[in-house]
Amino acid sequence: MVQDIKGLEQWVGYLTRAELPVLKQTARDLATLLEDPNRLSARGVAQVIAVDPMLTVKVLRYLQLHKHRSQQSEVVQVEQALIMMGVEAFFSKIPPQPLVQDVMQGHTEALIQLLHVIHRAHRASAYAYDWAVRLTDLHFEEIRIAALLHDLAEMLMWCFAPKEMLEIRAMQQKDKTLRTRAVQEEVFGFNLLDMQKQLVKNWQLPELLLNLMDDEFTNHQRVRNVVLAVNLARHSANGWDDAALPDDYSDIAQLLRMKPEQVMLMIGVEAGTICDLNKPHLSGKES
């Protein structure tokens, strides 16, 4: 894996030059579409890309770097990007390679953790999309993508710094009180949120997407939607008895203007795992 990269600037520079890997299943599904011209469409390809955070970034990044001078608005939706650049151009300019499984060969445990993070991102994006639709927000697809990419830096570091990421995980498992940012700064010398902000600026990703992924703008409904969806996906991944979930239910209820109990029914929390909302509980929210 990557050796002798130290500090935020060096990592941002390396990841800006690096070819981001894609999931093996994504490559297989795209190959299947290529074999059947009748199914090969911008929508069909976009549906495959939609479940792969890193390929989503590659598409949006390519379009931003190669946009025409006449282009007045930024493109955040993948299907729209494919229509603008053409499906054939996508396959020639942004081939689905290298594969994550090849890049992480020999790092099975880190690969498993990466797949967990991606699965968590899928759930967050589904929650965010559903809530945006409920709120009649016309930017529902952009909100979905922002939730999908919210933890992009974590995914990238599992790919390119698996040993360090496993070290962080072991430290947190040993001491549950350790704050995520503090451990990242101890191991890397910076936290991944700061790195992600710098990366997406360097990659010239659409400003709307940057704002939606920025937790500092939680006073905006759309950003709050993304943050709450990410929190719910992260905390529920620990089990439906996670101490932070009652706070999540209350926050989501406030966003959607419903009762916490209704939120729990909406997301399908099983009766046997429902926390008593009237009992005091510890806040396990992410740092």
Image (spheres, rainbow, N blue to C red):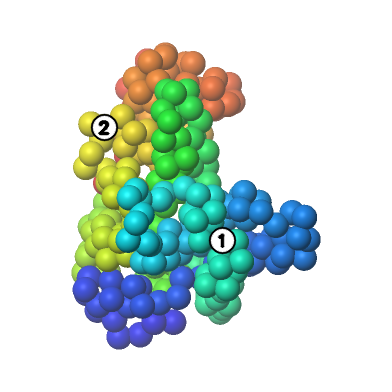
Residue to which mark 2 is pinned: 220
Report the residue marked by disc 1: 86
Q: Is residue 256 above or below residue 223?
A: above
The residue type indicated by label 1 comes to Gly
Asked whether, in this view, residue 161 is left or right of residue 118, the answer is: left
Circle 1 residues within 10 Å: few <14, some 14–19, many ≥20: few
Inspect the image, locate mark 2, and give the three-letter code of the amino acid beneath it. Answer: His
Instruction: Confirm whether residue 168 shows in the render.
Output: no
For residue 109, side relative to residue 196 (left or right): right
Counting from the top left corner in percent of width and height, residue 36 is at 78, 61
Above-or-below relation of 151 to 274:
below
Q: Quadrant of the N terminus?
A: bottom left
Determine which quarter of the picture holds residue 99. bottom right
Q: CA distance from mark 1 to mark 2?
A: 34 Å
For marks 1 and 2, give the one nearer the viewer: 1
Q: Residue at x 41, y 28 (%)?
A: 137
